[in-house]
Image (cartoon, rainbow, N blue to C red):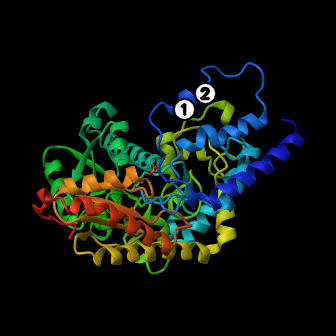
Amino acid sequence: MDPEEFRKRGKQMIDYVADYLENIRDRRPYPEVEPGYIKELLPDHAPNKPDKWDDVFSDIERVIMPGVTHWHSPQFHAYFSTGNSYPAIVADILSDAIGCIGFSWASSPACTELEMVVMDWLGKMLDLPQDFLFCSGGKGGGVIQGTASEATLVALLSARTKMIRKLLETGDYKDQGQIMPKLIAYCSDQSHSSVERAGLIGCVKMREIPADDSGAMRGSNLKLAIEKDKSKGLVPFFVCATLGTTPSCAFDNILEVGPLCKEEDIWMHIDAAYAGSSFICPEFRPMLNGIEYAMSFNFNPHKWLMVNFDCSAMWVKDSQLVSDAFNVDPLYLKHDHQGKIPDYRHWHIPLGRRFRSLKLWFVLRLFGQEGLQENIRKDVRLAHEFKDLVKTDHNFEIIGEVKMGLACFRLKGKNDRNEMLLKAINEDGRIHLVPSKFRDIYFLRFAVCASRTTSDDVKFAWKVIQELSRKYLSDSSNENIQNKTSLE
Ligand code: PLP
């Protein structure tokens, strides 16, 4: 592809992308293919001689699209929302063209410096405490990680190093090997699987604290566990609190958990992967109260802030503690300005990093805080609208409280009928949902995911659900009622 062809084909691709997104409603959100379908459509060797562009381009519809789950379809209501906007897509084109590997300031100064600026901008939009921001002149600051999973792991490894150093200084331990089996971390039993995984990768025990009836981790349960573990000679060092849990969007009580962590010198990390974006709205910001107790905080602009994957914003109060866990400094990476400005390679796991701040910068500038707030408020409004529709039908019940853009619901009665209903919904294919469970209650999650979702889409989804539920309502074998054991 020469430059002239690139200009032509690039424009053709932009048109394709705009058509794809603007007409996405016409596509079934969940694909109908079976595993292995692509292998049947493609040769088993790469071409020897170059293929023609037109053949590659036409294979997008023939080969790729039949197997795409359309996350940005207004009829996609699974998982949580994931960001998508033209400004972010355009910025990623630029990032790919620049193609720098911004592991240090010197490896591309703009890559580091823009990230510092936009992370401060975003931190201010969330009204984060000053000590998380570069502009405070302290040790705090923000970094863009690829995912919330990586942020949790970085936090856990930093906390681990901090505690190991502290214990080694006491002189009671001979080496790290003696300390590692004693370390224990905590999260709620509603935390995302990535938290358990961080414990596995970090080779530390992770204790799950049973959530209360609303799905929240409470200080009292955590305190009990910490005391019990300490009496067994274990060393609590890390708590991951979640704001907006994946199963039901519950909020851990960080105003209880935070002071406890402070008292026990435990690193509190807050995972607000989905709900964090909402804190740019003053009416949702009180849910972040208690952030002042956290050592690190993370949320995904790539979920609910119109930024395409991957862009996970993480702030730390003391970046030195993070660098301590990751700092290796070979000669070939050194430069003259070291120490004056962050070298982000010390803030995350891989060495290489993309110029991700560009898409955040484009989005923050081209939507403005007000535009982003509007999208969040719209999604919360639509989740409430769905909840109100569910409440009109006595066969259904709402599970938990609708706080963000997620409404959890189920057919009253046994779990089986809900499992069958979900299967029917996804086989039908007009909308796509995923299930969840709290204690023994199986329920369905209705997430408002796409920025294009409207009130009509919500009504459409409810119509589909009601229509498909009729079959299970007429099945009298299901009339045994499963007792609800809360989410309240
Ligand atoms: N934490 C929570 C609360 C989540 O809901 C999710 C994903 O939905 C994650 C972490 C994982 O996010 P990521 O894919 O960015 O690692």
Q: Answer yes or no: disc 1 within 8 Å of ligand 1.
A: no
- In the rendering, which numbered label is found on residue 1? none
Q: From the viewer's side, name the closer residue of 121 and 346.
A: 121
The answer to whether mark 1 and mark 2 are in CB contact below 8 A is yes
Which quadrant of the figure has residue 123? bottom right
Which amino acid type is marked by label 2?
Leu
Residue 438 in the figure: left or right of residue 161: left
Q: Which secondary structure lies at badge 2?
A: loop
Can you say which quadrant of the picture contains the C terminus? bottom left
Residue 56 seen in render: yes
Where does residue 440 sit, x and y in percent of width and height?
17, 55
Residue lying furthest bottom: 283
Question: Residue 216: in sight, yes or no?
Answer: no
- Residue at which label 2 appears: 42
Nearest the viewer among 174 and 202 is: 202
Q: Looking at the image, how many numbered discs can be counted on the residues?
A: 2
Give the x, y percent position of residue 413: 16, 63
Give the residue number, with chain letter if any, for mark 1: 38
Residue depicted at 31% across the width and 71% down the height = 255
Q: Amino acid at mark 1?
A: Ile
- Residue closest to the far right: 4
Residue beneath the point at 27% across and 58% down: 264
Indicate whether 56 appears above or below 230: above
Beta carbon at label 2 within 8 Å of ligand 1 = no
Q: Secondary structure at mark 1?
A: helix
From what the image shows, is residue 147 above or below residue 181? below
